[in-house]
Image: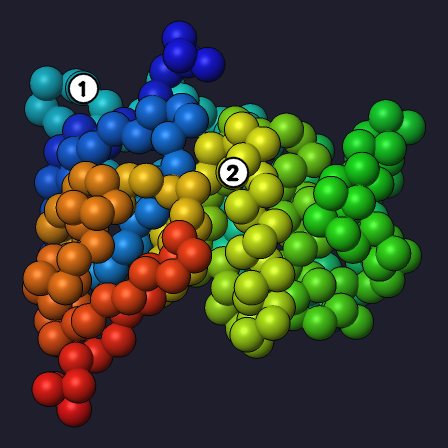
């Protein structure tokens, strides 16, 4: 894995929309194997950064021709080739796949198998092999939702459906998981169970890149924090160096206090600011 190209390379990447730079001159490298959290408030550019990586947004070209974005060493991915190698989980994907008017009537097992085709369902043109069905069942088992294999996605709780989507992302054995606000819509119990499953995935060797505005969902296994503010990188370093009251107060533009318990950090507004 040490000889593998970086998972993500940004070289002065800038994205402009309606005349405004929503991502401004971003440069960073995330090596394969380095669990990383990208942390910032709403409106800081986190979702735009995810869309940049998944090629839903495109950066300004450099005059010298150097690519502003490389994913796994390449800048010219076909998105359908990239998706099986980079598992993506987001609230937006949840809505697309679970909405009963779209893909939500699909069974959990079919939804996971569709991950092999980077599609939002199966069709007569997509004929899974027996090995694919077996791997899909194994992925559901890994996420402790094999008992839901025949249930329609739209019939599941938010937490159950989110674990099925993780199974879908894992079925192709991707090099990394990119998680964009993955606990949105989960209650306290479902959220903790979800994070516990993510910890096991991180410990198994799959690189985890977590994009969030919640300090308290940064896994203990994550050691690198990239702070994002107003479309720019406001800090990049180790967890102890980045997760400080001073740093977070500057990024969230409000007085922040921190607490650490069982490897998790939690942030709250300073009592003095209430």
Viewer-proximal residue among 184 and 60 = 184
| 266 versus 2 height, above or below | below
- Tell me: 89 left or right of 213: right
Q: Label 1: few (<14), some or many (≥20) within 10 Å? A: few
Q: Position of residue 255 (x, y in %)?
A: 12, 75
Q: Position of residue 42 (x, y in %)?
A: 27, 68
Q: Is residue 109 left or right of residue 14?
A: right
**Going by the picture, which residue comes out furthest to the bottom?**
274
Q: Residue at x 84, y 51 (%)?
A: 146
Which label is found at residue 258?
Answer: none
66 or 70: nearer the eye? Answer: 70
Is 252 placed above or below 117 here? below
Viewer can see residue 9: yes
- Foreground: 69 or 126? 69
* Count of numbered labels shown in the rendering: 2
Q: Residue at x 82, y 63 (%)?
A: 152
Q: Please report contact status of discs 1 and 2: CB closer than 8 Å, yes or no.
A: no
Q: Which colouring convention does the figure follow?
A: rainbow
Dot 2 lies on which element? helix
Instruction: Measure how far apart labels 1 and 2 are at the Cα level.
Output: 32 Å
| Residue 83 in sight here | no
Disc 2: which residue: 202
Tag 1 residue = 66
């Amino acid at each position: 894995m040490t000889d593998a190209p970086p998972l993500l390379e940004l070289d002065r990447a800038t994205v402009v929309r309606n005349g405004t730079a929503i991502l401004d001159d971003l440069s960073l490298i995330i090596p394969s194997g380095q669990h990383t959290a990208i942390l910032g408030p709403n409106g800081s550019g986190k979702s735009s950064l995810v869309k940049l990586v998944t090629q839903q947004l495109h950066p300004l070209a450099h005059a010298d021709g150097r690519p502003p974005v490389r994913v796994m060493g390449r800048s010219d991915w076909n998105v359908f080739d990239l998706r099986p190698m980079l598992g993506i989980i987001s609230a937006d994907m949840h809505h697309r796949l679970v909405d009963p008017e779209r893909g939500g009537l699909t069974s959990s097992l079919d939804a996971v198998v569709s991950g092999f085709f980077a599609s939002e369902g199966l069709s007569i043109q997509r004929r899974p092999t027996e090995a694919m069905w077996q791997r899909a069942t194994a992925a559901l088992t890994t996420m402790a939702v094999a008992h839901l294999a025949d249930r329609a996605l739209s019939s599941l709780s938010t937490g159950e459906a989110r674990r099925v989507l993780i199974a879908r992302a894992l079925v192709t054995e991707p090099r990394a998981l990119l998680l964009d606000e993955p606990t949105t819509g989960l209650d306290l119990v479902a959220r903790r169970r979800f994070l516990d499953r993510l910890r096991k995935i991180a410990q198994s060797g799959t690189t985890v890149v977590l994009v969030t505005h919640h300090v308290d969902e940064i896994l203990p296994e994550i050691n690198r924090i990239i702070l994002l503010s107003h479309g720019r990188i406001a800090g990049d370093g180790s967890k102890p160096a980045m997760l400080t009251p001073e740093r977070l107060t500057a990024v969230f533009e409000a007085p922040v206090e921190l607490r650490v318990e069982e490897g998790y950090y939690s942030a709250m507004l300073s009592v003095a600011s209430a």
